[in-house]
Amino acid sequence: MIQDSNKSTLTFKKKLLSRRFKYGLKTNLSYTETKNHHIHQVQHKIISGQYKLASRSCPVCTKSDFTVIAEIDRHSIPKSSVLCTYCGLMQTNPVPRDSDFKDYYENHYRYIYGKFRRSSLEDHIENFNKNLRVGRGPLIYQLVTQQLELKRARILDIGCGTGSMVKIFTDHGHDCLGIDYDNDFLEYGISIGLNLRNCSIESLIHDEPFDLIIMAQSLEHDPNPNRTLEIVSKLLKRNGHLFVTVPDVRYVTMPESRYRRIRNLFGSISFPHVFVFSLQSLMNLLGKHLFEIKTLTDHEHGNSLGDGHLAVLCSKNNNRGFDLISDYEEVKDLLFSIEKTRYFVITYWYDEFREHSYNIRLKLGLTSLSTKMFKSHPPH
C-alpha cells in the first residue's frame, strides 16, 4: 500500500498476465540501432529517476484498488499497467509527470514508433499526402458530416500532427485550428498555410469557442483526461460537439478480430498509452464530464474506421447525471483469456518471427517482404 497526492491509501495487487510481463525479463527483440538507442534512453530515464512516477487514484471513479497485470511495455520499458477493480479502466499507474511525457514525445516517440521517425521533410510530405488519401482524416470527415450539418464551423483538432485533418476540413470551408507538441510535424503544415500551433489546450481558453473538437487517438495518451475534458467542455459552444477515437481493448486483443493482424497483448501495452479503453470505460469517462454519446462507431455498430477503434460523437448535456458502470470482470477475463490462448493463433507466431528475425532479414535484404504482404496492416 502507498499514498497518493491526496493522502488516500492505494492498493496494488499483482496478478500479471504471464511471466513475460514481469519487470526485468528481456524481450530479446530485434530493432534498428536508432530505435534501440531511444528505447534504452527512456529505460534509463525511468530507472535513474529522471522521469518521476507518481501513484494516484483512478481518474474516472476515484477509487484506489488496482490489479497489476504488467510491469513492462512491449519494448521492456518499465511501465505498470493496472486494472481498476471498481470500474475496470485499464491504465498506467504510477504515471510519469506532464514534463516527462513532453520530453518523451519531443525526443523519443517518433524514433520508437512508426515509419516516419526520421523527421525529414520528405517523410512529412509523404505522411501528410498519405493521410489525405487513405488516412483516418477522410473517414472521420465522412463520419462527422453524416451526423452533423456543419456550416462554416469553427473546429479544433487536438494532436493534429502534420495537419492533414485540418486541411480536409479547411478545404471544405471550415475555420480550423490544429494543436500539437511536435514542432517537426507542425512545421510542414504551417509551411503550406494551415492554422497550426505548438501549444496546450489551456492556452486556448480565451479564444472564440468551437463548434466541433476532434480528439483522434489522443485521449489514450493523455495523463490528465479529467483536466483535458473540463477544458474541452469550456472551449465548446453550448450546442457544440466532441468527436473521439481511441483503440478498443476488445479488438486490439481479440484473436478472431478481422481488424487487427497483431494478436499479441504486448501490442496493447505501450509507454505512451496511459489508458486502454473499453466502450464502457470510455462512456464512464465522457459521462463524468456530462458528454452524451450521440453516435457510436465500432465493430458491432459498423466500424467505418476499419481498424478496431472506438469512434464516438458526443454532445454536451448539462442536465444529465453520471451513472458509472463497471466492466472490470469482463476486461480482466478477456485479457487473461487472450494471453492463455495466444499459442493457438497463427498470427501470434508470425509476429513473433517477424520481430525476432528483423536483423537477420535486414542483412539478407528481406525486410520488405512482410511490408508487401501486409501493406494495409503495418506493424506496431
Image (tube, helix red, strand yellow):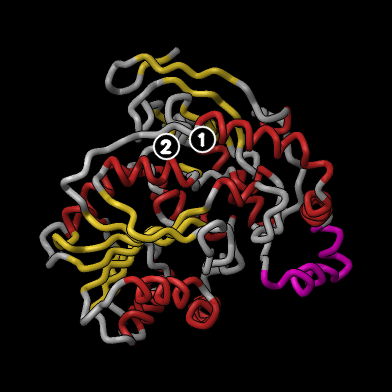
Q: Amino acid under label 2?
A: Pro
Q: Which mark is residue 214?
A: none
Asked whether the residues under the numbered discs 1 and 2 touch, taking CB atoms below 8 Å apart as contact, a structural biologist would say: yes
Q: Dot 2 lies on which element?
A: strand
In this rendering, which labeled residue sits more in front, label 1 or label 2? 2
The picture places residue 286, in percent across and down from the top left corner, at: 32, 46
Residue 208 part of the magenta-drawn span: no
The picture places residue 168, in percent across and down from the top left corner, at: 38, 81
Q: Amino acid under label 1?
A: Ile
Q: Which mark is residue 46?
A: 1
Q: Residue at x 48, y 24 (%)?
A: 85
The picture places residue 76, in percent across and down from the top left corner, at: 65, 39
Residue 369 part of the magenta-drawn span: yes
- 229 or 187, nearer to the observer: 229
Q: Is residue 322 above or below residue 16?
A: below
Q: Dot 1 lies on which element?
A: helix
Q: What's the magenta region?
A: 358-376
Q: CA distance from mark 1 to mark 2?
A: 9 Å
Q: Which mark is residue 96?
A: 2
Mark found first going from the N terminus, 1 or 2: 1
Q: From the image, which quarter does the N terminus lie in?
A: top left
Q: Residue at x 50, y 36 (%)?
A: 90
